[in-house]
Image (cartoon, rainbow, N blue to C red):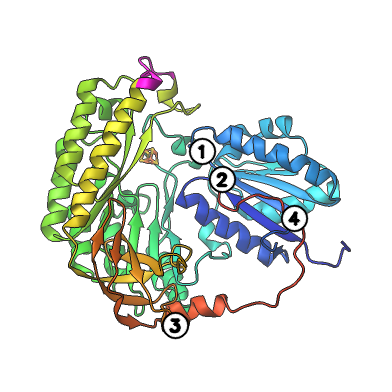
């Protein structure tokens, strides 16, 4: 490679939506600094790992991947490796001790410095570490390369003021910082002008949005304000915290037509004793009370949740309380997790860690109950007509079944029979009305095909982005998926 050839990059992302969105910013920054995204199977000149400290075995996976890259780097002069995200914030110089071939370690508050750090490492021929303890400017001011042409994440806050004992976020992402509503709305308007028609507002706890600038009703106002944006068809948000869920948010959801009737609200446990140990300040009754109000205002809302099984000290009685809340709440889906020790969290050193086998057995009972309920909830929808927005990735036509997939307004996954003629098929981002003909626990089918199809600006944006590029020779790949 000569010096005047642009350098290429690949970003490998682990973990949550916040990380996926940060990776879009990392890509945008590198684009802005003159790097080019590496072709799918190309060995990139710069590989960036955007890491997660939450998932089990996160460190094994990171160090495994770094080990895999060491010989590749040794055979590719000028190649650089950067590690960012929560593991970088947590492990800092340990990363360089364990993997001295890494060139840059940057913290969760230092995304904006990455191009400068890469350049400095290259010139000085020395690894660079930059970890700030708090955010100096909101990362939304950084450029972004979005994964999707028609849907976008929009961060409204970063960090969290809660202290849930199983969570590493407060230690690694710092106190909540809220972005001003005008900035958020300005970004959404700009995205809509580019063809985006669905946004998901992102924050660790969206219900406390505004606490930093002294407006407790800011989140409800923000939802209502998104309803004024012409061309914005769907608004979602994640995640709300049950302790801060107020009636004004429910009213704003119900009264703003482009705010979707779907709610993902983490329960974590149905036992008040476990919630207390988790330092989650709501109780099971309060949680179910919010669900009742949401259903009263939006009878067709789909409600999903997160549940941790086997938190330290969880008894059979506690677990039964979780099953009771799950049965009463009728979740349309639940993301279930077996508790595992996350170093650096208060729960990691709590007594009464539940034996693995017990956690496994409870987990299986929970998964069965959740599956039964979501199946029944889906079966009740068969025969109904719904609007589906076809999705990127999951929206590609499946050659074996002749179906394409998308999301209903309530965020349920729907597989839709589509015409054989490519010109008559929807594109990701297009909308169709379909009739639901079959229900499985985790998806629905619409085998009667498209009752009506709306070609959207989002679909146009998708088509423009995916216009076929001229084929060139493909270099040998690294074998790293971009989402780990
Ligand atoms: S609300 Fe609790 S679980 Fe969520 S980010 Fe904050 S501390 Fe973590």
- Disc nearer the start of the sequence (3/2): 2
In the image, which disc is placed on residue 108?
2
Identify the image quadrant of residue 156. bottom left
Relative image position of residue 395 (x, y in whole percent): 43, 67
- Disc nearer the start of the sequence (2/1): 2
Judged from the image, the secondary structure of the residue bearing numbered disc 3 is loop
**310 or 404: nearer the viewer:** 404
Mark-to-mark CA distance, 3 and 2: 47 Å
Q: From where the camera sits, is residue 79 visible?
A: yes
Residue at far right of view:
2
Name the side, left or right, on which 371 lies relative to 57: left
Q: Are marks 2 and 1 in contact (CB under 8 Å)?
A: yes
- Which residue is at 68% across, 32% downward? 93
**Which residue lies under the disc numbered 4?**
43
**107 or 459: nearer the viewer:** 459
**Which residue lies under the disc numbered 3?**
421
- Disc nearer the start of the sequence (1/4): 4
Judged from the image, the secondary structure of the residue bearing numbered disc 2 is loop
For disc 4, the neighbor class at 10 Å (few under 14, some 14 to 19, many from 20) is: many
Identify the image quadrant of residue 166. top left
**Which residue lies under the disc numbered 1?**
172
For disc 1, the neighbor class at 10 Å (few under 14, some 14 to 19, many from 20) is: many
- What span is colored magenta in the figure? 349-357
**135 or 231: nearer the viewer:** 231
Name the side, left or right, on which 120 lies relative to 190: right
Q: Are marks 4 and 3 in contact (CB under 8 Å)?
A: no
């Amino acid at each position: 490679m000569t010096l005047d050839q642009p350098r290429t990059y690949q970003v490998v992302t682990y973990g949550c939506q916040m990380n996926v969105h940060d990776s879009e910013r990392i890509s945008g920054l590198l684009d802005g600094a003159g790097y080019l995204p590496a072709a799918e199977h190309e060995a990139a000149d710069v590989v960036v790992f955007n890491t997660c400290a939450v998932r089990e075995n996160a460190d094994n996976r990171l160090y495994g991947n770094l080990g895999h890259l060491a010989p590749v780097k040794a055979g590719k002069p000028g190649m650089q490796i950067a590690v960012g995200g929560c593991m970088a914030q947590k492990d800092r110089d340990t990363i360089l001790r364990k993997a001295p071939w890494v060139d840059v370690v940057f913290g969760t508050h230092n995304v904006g410095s990455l191009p400068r750090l890469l350049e400095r490492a290259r010139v000085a021929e020395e690894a660079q570490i930059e970890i700030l303890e708090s955010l100096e400017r909101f990362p939304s001011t950084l450029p972004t390369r979005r994964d999707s042409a028609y849907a976008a994440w929009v961060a409204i806050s970063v960090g969290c003021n809660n202290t849930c004992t199983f969570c590493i976020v407060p230690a690694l992402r710092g106190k909540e910082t809220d972005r001003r509503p005008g900035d958020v709305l300005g970004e959404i308007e700009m995205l809509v002008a580019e063809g985006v028609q669905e946004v998901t507002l992102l924050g660790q706890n969206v219900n406390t949005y505004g606490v930093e600038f002294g407006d407790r009703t800011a989140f409800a106002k923000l939802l209502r304000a998104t309803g004024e944006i012409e061309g914005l068809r769907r608004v979602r948000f994640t995640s709300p915290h049950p302790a801060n869920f107020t009636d004004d948010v429910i009213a704003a959801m119900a009264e703003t037509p482009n705010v979707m009737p779907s709610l993902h609200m983490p329960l974590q446990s149905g036992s008040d004793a476990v919630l207390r140990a988790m330092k989650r300040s709501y109780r099971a009754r309060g949680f179910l009370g919010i669900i009742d109000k949401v259903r009263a205002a939006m009878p067709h809302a789909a409600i999903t949740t997160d549940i941790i099984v086997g938190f330290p000290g969880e008894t059979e009685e506690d677990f039964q309380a979780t099953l009771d809340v799950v049965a009463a709440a009728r979740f349309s889906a639940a993301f279930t997790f077996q508790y595992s020790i996350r170093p650096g969290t208060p729960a990691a050193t709590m007594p009464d860690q539940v034996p693995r086998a017990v956690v496994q057995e409870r987990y299986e009972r929970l998964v069965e109950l959740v599956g039964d309920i979501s199946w029944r909830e889906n079966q009740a929808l068969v025969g109904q007509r719904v609007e589906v927005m076809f999705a990127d990735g999951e929206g590609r036509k499946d050659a074996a079944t002749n179906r394409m997939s998308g999301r209903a307004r309530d965020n349920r996954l729907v597989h839709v029979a589509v015409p054989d003629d490519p010109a008559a098929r929807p594109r990701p981002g297009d909308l169709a009305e379909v009739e639901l003909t079959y229900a499985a626990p985790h998806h629905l089918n619409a085998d009667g095909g498209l009752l009506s199809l709306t070609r959207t600006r989002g679909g146009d944006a998708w088509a423009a982005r995916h216009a076929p590029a001229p084929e060139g020779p493909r270099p040998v790949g690294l074998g790293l998926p971009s989402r780990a």
